[in-house]
Amino acid sequence: MKKYNFNAGPSMLPREVIENTAKQILDFNGSGLSLMEISHRAKDFQPVVDESVALIKELLNIPEGYSVIFLGGGASLQFCQVPCNFLVKKAAYLNTGTWAKKAMKEAKHFGEVVEVASSADANYTFIPKDWACPTDVDYLHITTNNTIYGTEIRKDLDVPVRLIADMSSDIMSRPVDVSKYDCIYAGAQKNMSMAGVTVIIVKDDVLGKTGRDIPTMLDYRTHVEKGSMFNTPPVVPIYSLLENMRWLKKNGGVEAADKRAHERADALYTEIDRNKLFRGTVKEEDRSVMNLCFVMNDEYKELEKPFLDFATERGMVGIKGHRSVGGFRASCYNAQTMEGVNALIQAMKDFEAQH
Ligand SMILES: *Cc1c(COP(=O)(O)O)cnc(C)c1O
């Protein structure tokens, strides 16, 4: 049976990305060696890194003066690496969910953390809007897409201080004005590649300003200077990232990805709102187009498990909601298809007809 993958991360990748990566794992560029067996310093691998960086810069229209680096450790390591490289005294954080909260916790190791606003009391069902960014902070940190709760800041904020964003779950899904950010980071396994590599876009001239004695591996400058080759980078995830960026470019870049994301989300939210069994969990204006969270209306609560089974029998994978929200979550990153979304919508309609 055909499977429709709605996993939140690691998540669906285009079939051709997986196939092309698999080929290189068996025989890298006709060398007779696997991509997993070659040196990262092999002359054939440098072009993989170079092309990946070039494509990311091209797709996101990154201005001069920024570096793109590939590190291990996931977005979670960035929760500490960001403050280590940018926080001198005080930093501001917008608390919009589990990941934002974890980022705040790590920043406290390096200085004072100001929570500018939080929607924690409402189980993160909206993006706080009524706040002002303090001007006496080293930076403001935001999470552009809240993967667990299904809210999103799908625009580039204007703030009076350095802006740093965790874009793990919506990077490459829309055009971004990179010039508004001093640092953008993203674990690749949601929308760029398989797990194992984190992409960091950083403005060069803001590095090295904290006066802090930073351990070599945690210092962004180490990796900028060595072109992500200071130590062994995650070779296979970087290769699959390259294939994914080639695929994205071929398919119209981030503008087209944005359009497709809205088409998928509009169709699914329309059904969530129409269907008598379901309701969305977050404030409409803050709905994420990447992670769509919904639950069953109170009078049908006991049908959640039966619907999950019903949808699973029809090939849906990964639609169970995160435990902090319950219900369902359909993750629709770049590789998601309208066919998959339509299959889910049809399952919702057919299940409604039975009840
Ligand atoms: C998944 C996720 C993370 C954590 O990523 P890891 O690579 O597992 O550390 C952080 N932030 C956001 C927004 C995420 O979606």
Image: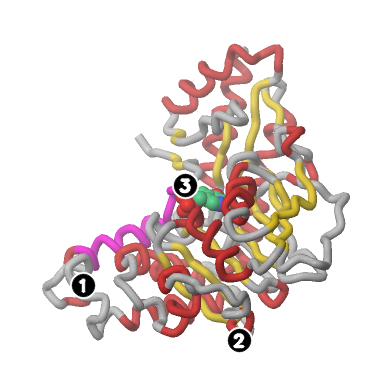
The answer to whether the beta carbon of the residue marked 2 is less than 8 Å from any atom of ligand 1 is no
Nearest to the observer: residue 206 or residue 196: 206
The answer to whether the beta carbon of the residue marked 3 is less than 8 Å from any atom of ligand 1 is yes
Q: Is 43 displayed left or right of 264 in the figure? A: left
Q: Magenta stretch containing residue 15, yes or no?
A: yes
Q: Residues within 10 Å of mark 2 (few under 14, many from 20)?
A: few
**With respect to residue 221, does 90 lie above or below?**
above
Q: Residues within 10 Å of mark 1 (few under 14, many from 20)?
A: some
- If the image is split into quadrants, where does the C terminus sit? top right
N-terminal of the pair, mark 1 or mark 3, is 3
Q: Amino acid at mark 3?
A: Gly
Q: Amino acid at mark 2?
A: Gly
Residues marked 3 and 2 touching at CB (< 8 Å): no
Colour scheme in the image? Answer: secondary structure
Q: Looking at the rendered structure, which numbered label has been put on residue 9?
A: 3
Rendered location of residue 51, percent (x, y): 41, 80
Rendered location of residue 77, percent (x, y): 48, 57
Q: Pointer 1: what residue?
A: 28
Q: Is 325 displayed left or right of 200 in the figure? A: right
Rendered location of residue 211, percent (x, y): 60, 77
- If the image is split into quadrants, where does the N terminus sit? top left
Q: Which residues are magenta?
A: 9-25
Q: Looking at the rendered structure, which numbered label has been put on residue 65?
A: 2
Residues marked 1 and 3 touching at CB (< 8 Å): no
Cα separation, mark 1 vs mark 2, equals: 33 Å
For residue 119, say whether it is visible: yes
Q: Magenta stretch containing residue 157, yes or no?
A: no
